[in-house]
Image (tube, helix red, strand yellow):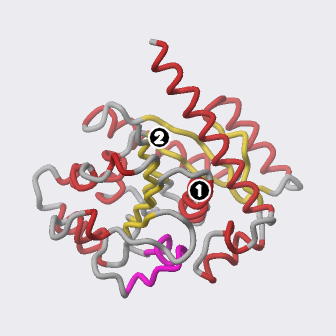
């Protein structure tokens, strides 16, 4: 059964795109079929996979506006055994046009429907804001993965995002849930990081992934080479952390499927 996960946080610079690219590569390394959907007009996830966002034939914009099917827009990155639905600044135009359409929040869900069964995981990289593109991603998803830095302001942003998730759940997507909270750019030497980390675990318990993503130079420089850290430096702490996250997600999914089958 396909798991569709929106990777979202309205605060920028928290490792959202980094998580999308590297989790896609790590899940693909475990022989899972993965599609990465870039819904951010900045197109950083697309570029981080080694795909030139300006040279793609079709983008997520064309798919959202119904001008081309998702299957025709999906491409393969040079490295990493997963698929990508690329995004670029044309998505800003798509957002403006969607505001004038009926059923606008359902466009991505409907566009992905024909290809959902081809993948085990679909990861959607959301813009760093709550707009129509993010709402489309949350409507299409069955879970939200929230990357966040362990700092005070991040907690405020988390509260606002959780309110948005609740609104989407109560209106257009009753199956939406918080898939997990991922602590990123963690430096255990900083006391505030440890304090915020403990608060997260206290309030969200099992929703907080045990895996933490450290500050890591290889992880930071991999996008400039247009490749996931797994192919940039497999032995780096960043690569090892995302492989660990993929393993934790797969264990969670196995347990969830087991519970469903037992009912």
Q: Secondary structure at mark 1?
A: helix
Image location (x, y in percent) of residue 4: 41, 46
Q: Could you tell me which residue is drawn at 47 percent across and 44 percent down?
A: 144
Instruction: Confirm whether the magenta stretch covers residue 193.
Output: no
Depth check: 117 or 246 in front?
117
Q: Residue furthest front?
A: 31
What kind of element bears circle 2?
Answer: helix
Which comes before the other along the chain, label 1 or label 2? 1
The stretch in magenta equals 43-54
Q: Nearer the viewer, mark 1 or mark 2?
A: 1
Q: Residue at x 32, y 47 (%)?
A: 140
Looking at the image, how many numbered discs can be counted on the residues?
2
| Residue at numbered disc 2 | 162
Which numbered tag is attached to residue 23? 1
Q: Is residue 93 above or below residue 207?
A: below
In the image, residue 211 sits, relative to residue 75, either above or below, namely above
Lateral position of residue 25 relative to residue 162, left or right: right
Q: Residue at x 17, y 68 (%)?
A: 97
Q: Position of residue 149 (x, y in %)?
A: 67, 55
Q: Find residue 224 and name its label.
A: none
């Amino acid at each position: 059964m396909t798991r569709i996960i929106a990777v979202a946080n309205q605060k920028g610079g928290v490792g959202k795109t980094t998580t999308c690219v590297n989790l896609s590569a790590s899940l693909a390394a475990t022989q899972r079929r993965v599609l990465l959907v870039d819904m951010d007009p900045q197109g950083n996830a697309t570029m981080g996979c080694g795909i030139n966002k300006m040279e793609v034939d079709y983008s997520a914009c064309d798919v959202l506006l119904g001008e081309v099917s998702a299957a025709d827009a999906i491409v393969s990155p040079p490295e990493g055994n997963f698929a990508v639905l690329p995004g670029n600044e044309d998505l800003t135009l798509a957002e403006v046009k969607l505001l004038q359409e009926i059923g606008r929040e359902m466009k991505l869900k409907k566009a992905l429907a024909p290809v959902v069964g081809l993948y085990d995981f679909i990861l959607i990289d959301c813009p760093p804001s709550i707009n129509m593109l993010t709402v489309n991603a949350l409507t299409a998803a069955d879970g939200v993965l929230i990357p966040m830095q362990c700092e005070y302001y991040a907690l405020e942003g988390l509260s606002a995002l959780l309110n948005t998730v609740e609104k989407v759940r109560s209106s257009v997507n009753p199956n939406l849930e918080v898939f997990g909270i991922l602590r990123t750019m963690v430096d255990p030497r900083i006391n505030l990081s440890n304090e915020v980390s403990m608060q997260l675990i206290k309030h969200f318990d099992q929703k907080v992934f045990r895996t933490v993503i450290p500050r890591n130079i290889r992880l930071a420089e991999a996008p400039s080479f247009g490749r996931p850290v797994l192919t940039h430096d497999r032995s780096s702490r960043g690569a090892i952390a995302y492989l660990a996250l993929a393993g934790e997600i797969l264990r969670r999914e196995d347990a969830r499927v087991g519970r469903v089958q037992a009912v």
